[in-house]
Image (cartoon, helix red, strand yellow):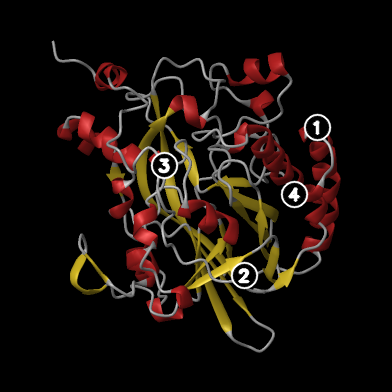
Amino acid sequence: MAPTPTAVLKRLNPLPSAPPVAPPAQAHPLAIPVPEAVELGAPITTLERIHRTEGGPGAALRIARTAATDFKREFTATGTPAHVSTHDLVTLPYPTKFGLWRAPASPSPFLFITNRLVIVRWTDSDGRRRTLLWEPSDTGLGGNTPYFAALQARTPKPLLDTMVHFKATALERLAEVGIDTAEVDYVAFDHLHTQDVRHLIGTIKPQADISPNAPVAAWLPKAKLVVQRTELEAMRDLHPLQRPWYQPDTYVDLDPERILPIDGDRLLAPGVAIIRTPGHATGNQTLVLNTGTGVWALSENMIATECLTPEHSKIPGVKGWARTWGQEVIINANVLETIATQYNSCVVEKTLVDRSQRDSRFLQFFPTSELTARPVFSPGTSPTFVHGSLHHGT
């Protein structure tokens, strides 16, 4: 009798042995360009006190709640963007022990997440229309991330083809909604784990793997990468715990003119903000949107909205873990950089967002990689509630 997909997955180590991505001790940091921080949009001063707290993470958590409450009141008064829409890119496996931290009772080593592109459009005060792409992942090159490359090498190709479902590229999704690539002003990610942005914004030198004879031509000819400056700095000299999740060599030949580093929290437009939510990654950031249904937060700090209200989760183990240990959120923790800080960042997101109009038990936190039901492959990890998509405006 042939083994089931679940049985095959159980034999795969959810922490595969990756090929070395750097010498044990790097002699010199990578020469990744880190331009000076820019004043994009307007600074958000209300949240600054979260990151300047004296004392331990418990004190920081209390301040985070009050600061987020104050910011939400200010943010909702700014207005709303013209357009928000989400678009599926790929569904793929992800270790259960990372996505649901220590809470799940499922025997499956993997669950499944769907990564989505978010398109946001607004009009500046001078009348210019702006377009931001949040999480426009290059799903082809993303597979070269050391962790996923090692996992692919250990997985039989027929099974891999069944597990990974490519739905469309970011460019195809833009074409579907009638947005020209030259209209895109900004691209941004909540953090740069797995991301290779060379195709998106181009390079200044040839690249041996994808363009050996000429610099990479940008798919998005005018777009600039909006990133926390702290993450670029961290990528220059990664810690061993960080290396499996980054592709730092792909950032060395980016054009510095195409990078917009920011330091801190920025209001980009009415109802559009990027705020710091460190923990999952050094420079983690969250997209916050005000829409017709209220405030949303979008990041990968958690993989399901029920991770913000675990008392309502039907995923085996989640509700019990939260109740036993008094934890109000279930974080997505693949790199254990600063767990308590990530927890506090998740509480900021929880405080900011409004309740879902479809089911008030759950909140308008939209994971840009959202837990997806695949019961044959990963029993016991099907979500209780999914947003699936988000649409606002025209």
User: Foreground residue, 122 or 137?
Assistant: 137
Neighbor class of circle 1 (other Cα within 10 Å; few <14, some 14-19, many 20+) is few
Residue 270 vertical position relative to residue 111 in the rendered view, above or below: below
Q: Amino acid at mark 2?
A: Ala
Q: Which residue is mark 1?
A: 58
Q: Amino acid at mark 3?
A: Arg
Residue 215 vertical position relative to residue 226 in the rendered view, above or below: below
User: Helix or strand or loop: what does disc 1 sit on?
Assistant: helix
Q: Nearer the viewer, mark 1 or mark 4?
A: 1
Q: CA distance from mark 1 to mark 2?
A: 30 Å
Q: Earlier in the sequence, mark 2 or mark 4?
A: 2
Residue 205 numbered mark, or none: none
- Tell me what residue is drawn at x 63 percent, y 33 percent: 339
Q: CA distance from mark 1 to mark 4?
A: 19 Å
Q: Amino acid at mark 1?
A: Gly
Q: CA distance from mark 1 to mark 3?
A: 29 Å
Residue 243 numbered mark, or none: 3
Q: Are marks 1 and 3 in contact (CB under 8 Å)?
A: no
